[in-house]
Structures are given as C-alpha cells and as structure tokens.
Amino acid sequence: MIRIAAVGDVHVDKDVVGRYRPALEQLPDRADALLIAGDLTRHGTPEEAKCFATEFGGLAVPVVVVLGNHDHQTDQQQRVTEVLTDAGITVLECSTTVLEIRGHRLGIAGAKGFGGGFAGACASNFGEREMKNFVGTTEDIAARLGEALRSVTCDALVALTHYAPVPETLVGEPLEIYPFLGCYQLGNAIDSAPTALALHGHAHHGSERGRTPGGVPVRNVAHPVIKQAYNVYQLLSESVDAELVPA
Amino acid sequence: MTKQIDLEAEIQRLLTEHDSVAEQGITVHRRENQVVLSGEVESGQRRDEICRQVTSHFPEIEITCDIGITRAQAPSEVEEIS
Ligand SMILES: [Fe+2]
Ligand SMILES: [Fe+2]
C-alpha cells in the first residue's frame, strides 16, 4: 500500500506562511509522499518560492511538485525551480522521479501541461503563427509527458500536471474557458502508459473526480476544490482501510 | 447591455492582472445594481485587497464581497484508488 497526499493551487506568499503547516506536520502519519499540482506561488518570484519552501519544505515525507501558470508570471521559473530544489523539493517538468516506499516503487511523471481544449471543442495547429505556437506548445508538452510516463519502471505510476487532462474535473467552471484549463492531449499521454492515477489543479471551480478515455482515475486537487490542506489517495491496496488515522 | 458585459470583463481582468491581486478564481456576477464577487482565496488579506481594488476602480458600483478563505485543516479520510 502507498498513500499519496496531494494538493494544488496553494498560491503561497508571505500572508500564507504558517496556514498549512499544522496539517503538514501530521503528514508522516497519513501519507508517504506529498505531490503538489502547480500554482505554488502567486507571481512566481524567487521570494514567493522561498515562502513556499518554508511552508512545504523540511517535511518528513518527500515533496514532488510541478509548476503552474502563476509560477511563470514573472518569467523567473528557472530561479523558482532552483529555490525549490535547494530546499529539497523535487520539481518535475516533462521528467520523472521514483520514490521507494515500504518496498514499493512509486513512479511520478510530471509536467505543467497547457490549454487547448477537449475533443469536439479544441484548438488546432493551424493558421496564424500565434495559434500554431499555442497548440504547438500543447502538443509538445503532452508528447514529452507521454514519453516521461512510458519511461518509468515502477509498481505504481502517477501523472502530475497543473492543467487538466479531461473535461470532467472542470465541471463547475464556465464552458467558455475550458480551452484555457486543459487539453485532451494530456489525457492521451496519460493513457499511453499504465498510469494508476492522474492529479491536476488549475481549475479552482472544477470538480474532484473524473476518468480519462482509457479509464485512468483523474483527481482535481486544486485547494479550493478539495477544501482542506491535502487529500490522501491510496494505491496498491492490500486491504481497504478508510480510516486515515486509527481512532 | 454591452456596458454590463464590459464591466464584468474589466473586473475579472483587474483581479487577474493587478499585481496585488493575481486571482483567476473569482467569479463576478451582476445582480441588478450590485456586483457580487464570489470564490475562495488563501488569506483574509487577499479578500480585503480584492474588495479594496474593485471599490476604488469602480466607485459608482455597489460591491458585495462573498469571497471565502479556503480551509487548510488536515483530512480525516483516505480515498482508495482502483
Ligand atoms: Fe491556481
Ligand atoms: Fe493555474
């Protein structure tokens, strides 16, 4: 059994430091790793990244993250990544990590992802240069996430993105903005590997549960969606135990 | 009519693009002469800043601020994925 804690869209700055910490201190009793699905900061400054590292670093479980669009706002995503890495946090961008957990290998492939829309209502790589750049970015990130997922050897494989791979977990958002919240290409990438669970954020008004066309469970863990410090998901269950902490 | 739609768009863009706010998750609804802001943010300071910015940019509009602070307690349950 592996237990994964997950949250996204924590948007940390000075005013948030300390809010999550009491719940995070309880992590080792509740989960084996913490995955964070992007929008770690408000504007993606190194100062905000330090605030994030203060709040989410130095935990007794490994912390694995992807960046979100907010973490790109000031074009300092490279510096942000360095600050997080220096704090012992693993930052994935079309890359993978494998954690050894009680004899099991948990494989995680992560990417920020991008928009583009979903089957029947998606943008095409056609026309103006700006449009081709947009959809080209979507396709490139999804292709590299797929390669990353297929490259991992592990017992349980998790896909971690910021943008959504399916429309089901966007329900609650205005339909008109779906193309800015995710793309079907991420879902295809997830389906191209034996993925056990796909986690994403970004859709603050979306819903928690969905599935890819290939049947992979998808969870939107955006903080305003889950409404607690993190959710816990259990993989490779030997027996079902719905009580998180024994009474 | 066009003016009303523009106002909602302007508020939405102010909340996203103003450096002291940077929120994409705030819903802007017009109810008669009122504009209702809803959604959740990470701190009380952020909620107050949103209301301050909208009030100062659109002083003629009556603003109702229904923005909450997302709770950050530890969970009590686990979901089994299968
Ligand atoms: Fe976000
Ligand atoms: Fe986002």
Image (tube, rainbow, N blue to C red):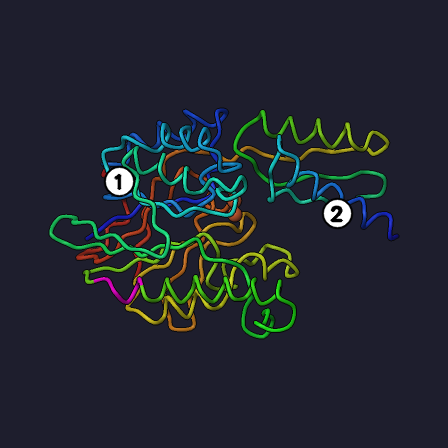
> Nearest the camera: A3 or A12?
A12
Q: Nearer the viewer, residue B15 or A226?
A: B15
The residue carrying mark 1 is A30
Within 10 angstroms of label 2, few (less than 14), some, or many (20 or more) residues?
few
**Chain letter behind tag 2:** B
Question: Residue A80: x, y in percent?
Answer: 41, 38
Foreground residue, A121 or A239? A121
Where is residue A169? Give x, y as percent. Answer: 49, 58
Residue under label 2, please give it: B9
In this picture, is A120 found above or below A91? Answer: below
Range drawn in magenta: A148-152
Tag on residue B51?
none
Q: Residues within 10 Å of mark 1 (few under 14, many from 20)?
A: many
Residue sitting at 75 percent across and 47 percent down? B9
Tell me where residue A155 appears, x and y as whole percent.
Answer: 19, 60
Q: Disc 2 residue type?
A: Ala
Badge 1 marks a residue whose secondary structure is: helix
Task: From the image, state whether disc 1 or disc 2 is nearer to you.
Answer: 2
The kind of secondary structure the magenta stretch mainly shows is helix
Q: Provide the chain ID for the residue under circle 1.
A: A
Quarter occupied by the C terminus of chain B: bottom left
Q: Residue at x 39, y 55 (%)?
A: A111
Q: Is residue A238 left or right of residue A71?
A: left
Q: Residue furthest left?
A: A103
Identity of the residue drawn at 30% across and 69% down: A193
